[in-house]
Image (tube, helix red, strand yellow):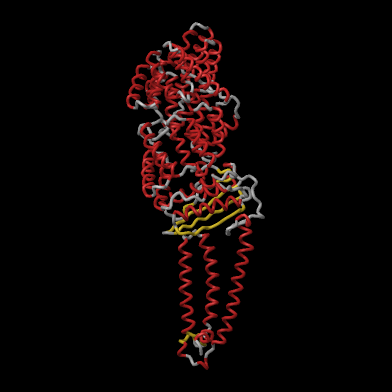
Amino acid sequence: MSFFNELKRRNVFKVGVAYLITAWLLVQVADMLLDNMDAPPWVLQAIFVVLLVGLFVTLLVAWAFELTPEGIKKEKDIDRSQSITPQTGRKLNAAIMIILVLALGYFAWDKFMVRPMQETAVVVSDSPADAVAEATLPTDKSLAVLPFDNRSNQEDDEFFTSGIHDDLLTQLAQISSLRVISRTSVVQFKDTSKSIREIAELLGVATILEGGVQRAGNQVRINMQLIDAATDAHLWAQTYDRELTANNVFKIQSEVATAVTEAMRATLSPEEQQRINSVPTENMQALEEYFKGRAELDQRTKPAIESSRLRFEEARQLDPGFALAYAGEAQAIMLLADSGSSYGEIPVTETLELARPLLEKALELAPRDAQVLGVYGLLESNSYNSELALDYFGRSLALNPSSGEVLNWQRMSQYGAGRIKDATETNLRMVEVDPMSMIALYNGVLGMSRLVEHDELTVEMMLERLEGLDKAFGLSARARVEGGRGNIPTAVAHHYRSMELDAGRTSNRDDLSDMLARAGLVDEALLVAPENVDNVSQWSGDWNTAIQLANEELEKEPDSIDALYELFFILMWSGDADSAYPLAARIWERFEQNPSEMSFSPLFMSWVAAKTEHTEQAYLYREAGAKYLQALIEAGLSGLNRYFSEATLAAIDGRDNDAIIAISNYIDRGGRWQMFLKHPVFDRLRNNPGFQAQVSRLADLVTTERGEILVMLCGPQSILTSWQPAPETCEIYQRETATAKS
C-alpha cells in the first residue's frame, strides 16, 4: 500500500482537518478574551506556537496509534483484519461537521451580531471610509484625544505611552478640517471617572478618541477607538500589533490619523498626508530619550527641565538628524533662564546664545515642522524680535492651529508688538482650543475682564473652572480680576487664601506683595515675598534702595534689556532726568525698528528727553507712546495701562482736563500707586483743583483700604488660617485702631 493510501487508512488527514478547524476556533475565542483582559501580545503568539507544535504531535499520534475497543494501541501491534479505522473515520467525519458548524456559527455571530451592536461601523480593514458609510456621524468635526492607558503595567513605560499620545495628537491637529483640543486640556482627564459625554461637554467636542498602549519586549500593541460623544457609539476601532521600532511607531500613528480622518469624513490634503507620514527618527533609542525629555519638560520644575535638556541632547547625539530633539533641547535651555517667567538661573542672554544654533540646525532639518517653527518663534520673542517671532508663530499655527503652547507665545509677542486687539483675540482662541488649560483660562479671564464690553457670566465661568482645576491658582486669578475692578481689599483677601493653599506660587506672592506695598504695608510686603524687594522699594518710593538694586542687576547682565528698563524707570521716576536720558537713548536704539515693543515706556522717555532739551527725540518718543495707547483703545481695553498711559500723554501734551479724567479712570479701575501722581510729569497740575481732588481721593482710598486689609489680617475675625502677619503690620493695626477710638 502506498504511503498516501496508508495516511488515508489511518485517518491522518481527517484528524489534521479536525485539529485545524478546532485550532482556528480556539485562536478566535482566545483573541477576543485576551483583548478584553488587556493581555500582552505575546500570550496569543504563545498559544499559536503551542497549537502549531500540537498539530505535528497530533498527526504523529494519528499515524502511530489507533483507537480500538480496548483503548489506544500502537498501530504495529494491531491485526489489520481487526482494525476499526473505517468506523473511526466515520466518527471523525461527524466530528468535523460539528466543529465546522460551530466555527461558521462563531464567524457569523462575530461578523453580523457583535460588531454592529457593540462597535457601530467598526473599521478593521484598510478602508475605514467604506466601513462607516452607513454610520451616523457627528456634523461637528471636533475631536479630543484622551490620554492613552499604559497597559504594560510598568511605570517606566508611562513616558512611552505619553509620547505616543502627544505625537498622535499633534498629527491629528495638523489636519485643517478637524478641530482638535490641545494636549494641556485633555491630560486633565487621565484616570478620570467622568463619562465620555461629560468630558465632551467640558471640552466642547463631538467625538472622543481613546486608546491604550502596551509593549512587551520588542512588540507593541496599540488599541484605538473613536466614539460619538452624544450616542456613545463607536465610529471606528482598530488594534495594531507590531514589532517595536521607531518606523512602526510612526507608521501606526499615521494609519490612525488617516483612519480617524476618514471615519469623521474630514478632508486630508496631500500635503497634510505627507506630513503625517513623515518619520522624524528611525532610531528607537533616540525616540525613547525624546519621549522621556518631553515628559520631564512638561513638569515645569527646575530639576525636571534640567534632566529633559540632557535627554534631548542624548537623543540628538543618537540621531544627528532628529530635528525635534534639537528644538526640545533649545526650549529646555530657554526655560532655564533667570527671567521671571522661567525656572532656572542661567542669564537670559546666555540661554539665547545656546539655543540659537540648536534651532538653526532644527530648522535646517525640518523647515516645515510646526513644533520647530514654534520654538524658533519663542527664541525670537525672548530676543525682543516680536515681528519676526510672530512670523514664526503664524507659520507654526498654520500647520498646527491647536497648539495652546504656541498660541500663548503668540499672545505675548502680539502684546509686545503693540497688536493688542490681536492679542485679545488670541486669548479667546486659547480658551477655545485649550478649555481646561490653566494658563489659557488665566490669560483668557484677565484679558476678557479688562475689555470695556465683556461677558460677566463667561468671566465667572472661567474663574470657576480655574478654581476647579487648581483652587490656589483660581483664587489668584480672581484676585487679579477684583483688583482690576477696583476691589482691592477683596483682591488681597483672595491672594492670601491662595497663598495659604500654595505658598510656593511665586507669581501669586509677588502680586500680593505689590498690592501691600502700594497700601503702605512695606514690612508685610517683604514678608510675603522677600525676593520682591526691588518692586517694593519702587512702590514705596525708596528710590535709593531701588537704584542700588537696579545698578547691581545691570552690572551682572550688561546686555539685559530688562535690567536696562528697570534702572531707567527708577531714575526717571525719582526725577533724575539727566541720568535717565542716556538709558532712554540705549533703549530706543534697541527698539527703533519696532518701538511698539516698549509699550507705554516711550511716553516717559519723551518726558525725560524734553526735560534734558532733546526736543527731536522727545517728539519721536511721544509718537511711539501714542501709537501704543491707540492700540489699547482700539482693542477695547479698560485696564490700568490704558488710563496710566492716557494720563501721562495728556500731561505731556498740556491737556489738563483730559489728564484729570484719565487719572480718575485709573483710580476707578483699581490704580492705587500714589507715587504715580507724584511724578514730575504732573508738576504743572499741582495747583489744579481737579488734580488735587484726585490726589486726595486716591490718598483716602488707600487709607480706607489699608484699614480694611489690617482688619482682615490682625482683627478679631482674621481671614488667615496659617499665615502669621509681620509684627509691624499688627502694630499699625493697633495704632490706627487706637487713633480711631480716641
Q: Nearer the viewer, residue 1 or 83?
A: 1
**x, y (%) of residue 434?**
53, 39
Q: Residue furthest top?
A: 687
Tell me what residue is drawn at x 44 percent, y 42 percent: 364
Residue 286 higher or lower than 58, as above or below: above
Q: How many marks?
A: 0
Q: Nearer the viewer, residue 579 or 99?
A: 579
Q: Nearer the viewer, residue 97 or 481?
A: 97
Residue 687 visible to an observer of this rendering: yes
**x, y (%) of residue 253?**
51, 52
The answer to which image quadrant residue 612 occupies is top left
Q: Nearer the viewer, residue 143 or 673?
A: 143
Tell me what residue is drawn at x 55 percent, y 24 percent: 631
Tell me what residue is drawn at x 61 percent, y 50 percent: 264
Residue 659 higher or lower than 533, as above or below: above
**x, y (%) of residue 628?**
52, 22
Residue 672 higher or lower than 251, as above or below: above
The answer to which image quadrant residue 517 occupies is top left
Residue 741 visible to an observer of this rendering: no
Q: Residue furthest front?
A: 364
Q: In which quadrant will I find the C terminus?
A: top left
Q: Is residue 3 left or right of residue 101?
A: left
